[in-house]
Image: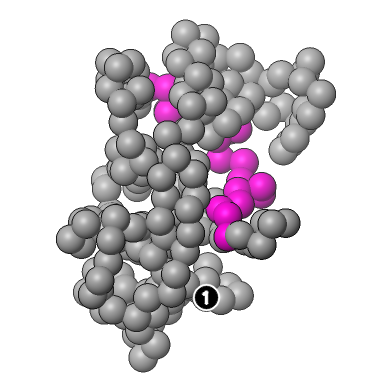
């Protein structure tokens, strides 16, 4: 769990801060942004609308959300605070990535679209939601291992031998490829 994001969430639950003009990085995203939750509690969300896998300077894959402004829009901060205010703080402290992923999906889509596949969690339907998709002959997607941080990613062609991983589409340019829950598809972002 992103501890700094949780600290920001608890502070926002007490009082929203709005823009942080005294921050040396302000505005890191856009003028007038809400800085109440500086470190996103949903990181890594693994939803391509908000980020993507990139290679870090050390050569390791990481989830980059540098162009995501979602958590810095006042209406989204208010919705996040309202959603999590229904939970005791201890539940939030003890919650894992899947809890926050489910919460993010419920906030975005009104319901959880991901589902369990053995020990893995299929987040591909959330990635495809609302996009124009067509059948694909290419049966490929990614399995992402996360823990306290982004640990690794591998290309997968079937649902065999999955561990405690998160399944997301393979992104190639503006195309996402993977399994939507019923069929293999490719969707335009």
Residue visible at 58% across and 21% down? 36
Residue 62: name its quadrant: bottom right
Q: Residue furthest top?
A: 14
Q: Residue 163's x, y, as percent?
A: 28, 61
- Vertical order, 145 against 69 (above or below): below
Q: Residue furthest left?
A: 118
Q: Residue furthest right?
A: 24
Residue visible at 48% across and 27% down? 3
- Vertical order, 54 against 98 (above or below): below
Q: Residues within 10 Å of mark 1 (few under 14, many from 20)?
A: few
* Label 1 residue SS: strand
**46 lies left or right of 164:** right
The colour scheme is one colour
Q: Is residue 17 magenta?
A: no
Give the tally of numbered discs: 1
Q: Is residue 65 magenta?
A: yes
Residue 52: name its quadrant: bottom right
Q: Which residues are magenta?
A: 61-82
Q: Quadrant of the N terminus?
A: top left
**16 lies left or right of 139:** right
Residue visible at 75% across and 35% down? 28
């Amino acid at each position: 769990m992103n501890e700094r994001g949780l600290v920001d969430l608890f502070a926002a639950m007490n009082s929203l801060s709005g823009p942080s003009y005294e921050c040396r990085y302000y505005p890191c995203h856009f003028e007038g942004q809400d800085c109440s939750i500086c470190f996103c509690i949903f990181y890594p969300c693994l939803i391509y609308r908000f980020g993507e896998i990139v290679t870090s300077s050390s050569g390791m894959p990481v989830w980059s959300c540098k162009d995501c402004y979602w958590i810095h829009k006042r209406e989204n901060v208010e919705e996040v605070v309202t959603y999590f205010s229904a939970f005791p703080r201890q539940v939030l402290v003890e919650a894992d990535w899947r809890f926050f992923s489910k919460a993010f999906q419920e906030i975005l889509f009104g319901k959880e679209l991901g589902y369990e596949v053995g020990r893995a969690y299929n987040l591909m339907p959330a990635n495809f939601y609302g996009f124009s998709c067509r059948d694909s002959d290419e049966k490929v997607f990614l399995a992402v291992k996360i823990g306290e941080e982004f640990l690794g990613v591998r290309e997968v062609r079937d649902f065999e031998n999955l561990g405690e991983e998160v399944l997301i589409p393979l992104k190639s340019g503006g195309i996402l490829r993977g399994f939507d829950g019923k069929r293999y598809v490719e969707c335009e972002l």
